[in-house]
Image (cartoon, rainbow, N blue to C red):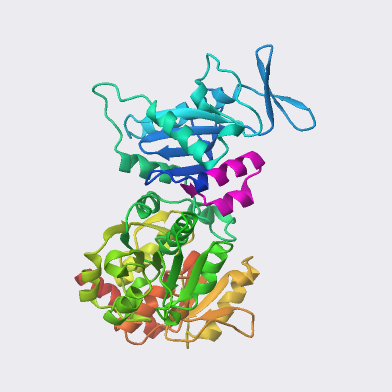
Amino acid sequence: MILVPDLADIEATATSGAERRVARVLSAIDAPDGAVAFHSISLRTHEVKQQAEADFVVLWEDVVILVEVKGGGVSKHDGLWYTVDRRGDWQKLRESPMRQAQSAMHALRTILQEEGIGWYASEAVVITPDIEAPPPGVEWKGSHWWAKQEMSIATMAAAFEAVVDGAKTAPYGVKVARLDRLRARLFGEFTRMPVIDAQRGAVIEEQNRATDDQARVLSALSRNQRLMVVGGAGTGKSLVLAEAAKQEASEGRSVLITFHSPALVDFFFTRIAGRAIELRPFAELNGERKYDVVLVDEAQDLMNADGMDALDLVIKGGRAGGRWRMFLDPNNQAHIDGSFDPDVYELVSDEALLLDLNRNVRNTRAIVHVVQEYLGADIGDPGIVNGERVQWRWAAAEAGLAAAEGLARELVDDGARREDIWIISVTSDDALVQSAAGFTVTSPRYAKGLEAEHVIVCDLPEVYDEHGLAGFYVAVTRARVTLHVVASKEDKQRLQELIRKQVGK
């Protein structure tokens, strides 16, 4: 069964040992296609409390099962419920474990009804993995309270099947929720993309939430053999890819993540650490090993005959019959590093389900508007509304690295962290380096696919041909919080000409 987040994340973050044990069993169950378990879910609507919590929400076939896990002992005395730890200490519960599960179930139903999802079957289950099941009571069915005897893969799978088989059917005449919509809505409600070192400020907080588009993609990934995911810079392609890879690995498949730019190694390594996922730049693939599933980031760089032939050699069943996910930007990035053949793209697209990411979850509204105004590039609707306007620094003389470093020092004086500032030279092809002043300096080629909180763009191109447009596009779409552009008077004239071209289209 797919876990969200995956088992490694649950093991690292869950505060309950009982929940970790349940997660291990869930991850090993050979569940029906598309079954997924979401861990530690907060539900905003509750009849008594401001917020309810479900330890697990499981979608099994077309039934949503709310699971409450209680470790240690559980006791009922004089009508009141208590938990009992190993030391024999009792702690009073506000309500019975089954009542907790049922109230979370009703809270989720209220949320989804408010959003017009339609009727769906739901059940509430309690798991007490340390004790025998209590005798049946009027409050629950015996099939819905699982104990230590259900803590094996086979018995828990059978218990799920029994609950699903006994679930209610839809009343006559009601609107029934479509399974694909229910699945996507659950992913949207419960999935959050991890962003490393991203807890400062309202802008970063907004970026940490998965969008409906990202949730829709995650929902479709596990059920389809081949997917082409298309989105502009900042729409979360690489984050979705990393989460998809973790899900594939948790299903026991051999997984490869590959890409053209070696700079992406560090980006992915921190997000998949500890998982059985191979991470190899495209140039290192030799066809000696084949993988159950291959995920390709920045696939526009490899969208040519040679690139597709090389991928064909590492996918079990080949590209036409195997399992793969390609993530690509339809705009100008392929002109930075790699080669894009539209005929090959059309051919490969016919082999896969095509999904779009339409919401920008990296760049602020101001940055999105600048990209649209100057380049006419579609990088999605702006999902982040906070943030400062784009800052233009009009240099009297040259608008190169020296001017950019001067601006970077000003940002540090204003409170920005030196390590959060990138300087991107648009006309450079150089790898990432640290300047003498301690700032990260790089080029569009090595910045592509990555991001920084504060970006200063300098060395604008004298000619906005394919390469110049692509470099400018990559540079200005890396910023998460603030974007600064250092430009000369001549640069300003060329940028104004770019706007006129967009207006004339």
Q: Position of residue 479 (x, y in %)?
A: 48, 67
Q: Say if 285 sits above or below 93 in the image.
A: below
Q: Position of residue 175 (x, y in %)?
A: 26, 29
Q: What's the residue at 47%, 61% (across, down)?
A: 242
Q: Position of residue 386 (x, y in %)?
A: 47, 54
Q: Position of residue 442 (x, y in %)?
A: 51, 81
Q: Quadrant of residue 137?
A: top right
Q: Which quarter shows the C terminus?
A: bottom left
Q: Is residue 378 visible?
A: yes
Q: Nearer the viewer, residue 287 or 369?
A: 287
Asked if the stretch drawn in magenta spans residue 421, the answer is: no
Start-end of magenta stretch: 1-25
Q: What's the residue at 33%, 35% (across, down)?
A: 117
Asked if the stretch drawn in magenta spans residue 7, the answer is: yes
Q: Is residue 279 left or right of residue 471?
A: right
Q: Nearer the viewer, residue 89 or 414?
A: 89
Q: Is residue 16 visible?
A: no
Q: Say if 423 sits above or below 248 in the image.
A: below
Q: Is residue 248 left or right of residue 416?
A: left
Number of marks in the image?
0
Give the prevailing secondary structure in the magenta stretch. Answer: helix
